[in-house]
Amino acid sequence: MDAKHAVSGTRASRGGKAKSGRPEAEAVFRIRGISKIYKMGAVDVQALESVDLDLYAGELAVMLGASGSGKSTLLNIIGGLDVPTAGEVIYADHDLTKANDKQLTEFRRDHVGFVFQFYNLIPSLTALENVQLITEIASNPMKAEEALEIVGLKDRLNHFPAQLSGGEQQRVAIARAIAKRPDVLLCDEPTGALDFQTGKIVLEAIQVVNRELGTTTAVITHNASIAQMADRVIRIGSGRIVSVDINETKLKPEDLIW
């Protein structure tokens, strides 16, 4: 396969729900020795240092760490929004660290859905129209109505963001992310701007996407309670992986308390 099609021509196999973290699971991402240094004037800031990590097909992984631990930097590198200073990120047997800007754009467009703390919806468009923005450019999208139904918003299609609660707006953002049928869903503090009850509703939507679509899902958070719903818990501190644990007693989002 030539370099031009190194990323865009490959989709990771989902093959059903993986027993995440166990040897029989298929690694969608293989991250080896990545470091990230940001230059702040004359000062070098080490955001990540020698990180090794695998993400497995169909799993729901929670990356847990305090603010400034490096978890957002790691997520951005996995999603092709940033590149490491050193090391390699292998996605489906292709090295993203050797991809050019065009190939990374194609990778993000074809394979990755992003959900951020803030919803980034267009105020002048309805929920349906916000999702349709993605379906119009995706290669194999689901119907926008279907994506909104998956996250429990089939009755709110024609509402504008100002007419929706914070949790509903976040679920529109999730629907927008999954409408292109991504292999990977990356969520950066998806409940950070929400209250406890609303946050649980959003986590339920993420769990539905992971379970029903088989989408490999990574959620980063500083909230230790959210880790209880994960297949694996990846703890990050001072730019390093502190521990990776299989969660043998998962809780449903509705049972979480924080």
Image (cartoon, grey):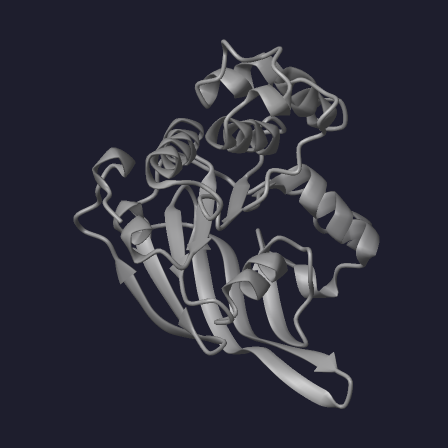
Spot occupied by residue 136 in the image (x, y as percentages of width and height): 75, 22
Q: Nearer the viewer, residue 178 or 115?
A: 115
Is residue 205 among the parts visible in the rendering? yes
Taking the spot 33% from the left edge, 35% from the top edge, the residue there is 197
**Image position of 69 with respect to 91: above or below:** below
Q: Nearer the viewer, residue 209 or 14?
A: 209
Quadrant of res 200 = top left
Spot occupied by residue 22 in the image (x, y as percentages of width and height): 29, 55
Spot occupied by residue 99 in the image (x, y as percentages of width and height): 75, 59
Quadrant of res 34 = bottom right
**Image position of 118 with respect to 41: above or below:** above
Q: Nearer the viewer, residue 190 or 217?
A: 190
Is residue 140 among the parts visible in the rendering? no
Return the residue found at the far left. 249
**Image position of 28 with respect to 243: above or below:** above
Taking the spot 38% from the left edge, 51% from the top edge, the residue there is 61
Taking the spot 78% from the left edge, 51% from the top edge, the residue there is 103
* Horizontal side of residue 37 vs 206, given as left or right: right
Quadrant of res 21 = bottom left
Spot occupied by residue 53 in the image (x, y as percentages of width and height): 45, 66
Number of numbered discs: 0
Q: Nearer the viewer, residue 190 or 136?
A: 190
